[in-house]
Image: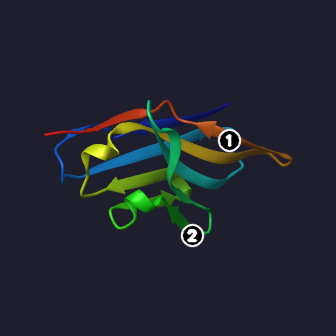
Amino acid sequence: QVQLVESGGGLVQPGESLRLSCAASGSILSINAMGWYRQTPVKGRVLVASIISGGSTNYADSVKGRFTIARDNAKNTVYLQMNSLKPEDTAVYYCNAEIRTTSWSTYPFWGQGTQVTVSS
């Protein structure tokens, strides 16, 4: 079985920073793409940032220049550094990873979600 465990959410004021972490564990042969999504009642779940095993990254326009995604392949961990946070960044943030569990099977896995609230 595979598990993704997130940490690092919380309550901050506008302009402050947070760093999210997501560690994958279990029956993992390799991990392809890893990413962060966020969900609100109004917009649903949307992609924030993603990174493939080679290191190429992709960001939503709303976070470009403020958020940075990175991964540590040796630790099966992905990070999201969030700077200059805005109230509109408030959401539940979910980690996602495409994990090869056998030589012929790759599945998407999700973390449990972590709340990020930006408010003065």
| On-image quarter of the C terminus | top left
Which residue in the structure is indicated by mark 2? Answer: 56
In the image, 113 versus 32, the foreground residue is: 113
Please say whether residue 76 is visible from this viewpoint: no
In the image, 64 versus 97, the foreground residue is: 64
Q: Label 1, label 2: how many angstroms apart (C-alpha)?
A: 19 Å
Q: Give percent across and percent down for residue 45.
A: 52, 39
Q: Quick one: label 1, few (<14), some, or many (20+) residues within 10 Å?
A: few
Q: Which residue is drawn at 68% across and 30% down?
A: 1
Which residue in the structure is indicated by mark 1? Answer: 108
Q: Identify the coloring.
A: rainbow
Q: Quick one: label 2, few (<14), some, or many (20+) residues within 10 Å?
A: few
Element on which disc 2 rests: loop
Q: Which residue is drawn at 41% across and 46% down?
A: 21
- 9 relative to 51, above or below: above
The first of marks 1 and 2 along the sequence is 2
Amino acid type at circle 2 is Ser
Residue farthest right in this picture: 104
Amino acid type at circle 1 is Pro
Question: Left or right of 55: which side holds 28?
Answer: right
Q: Give percent across and percent down for residue 86.
A: 25, 50
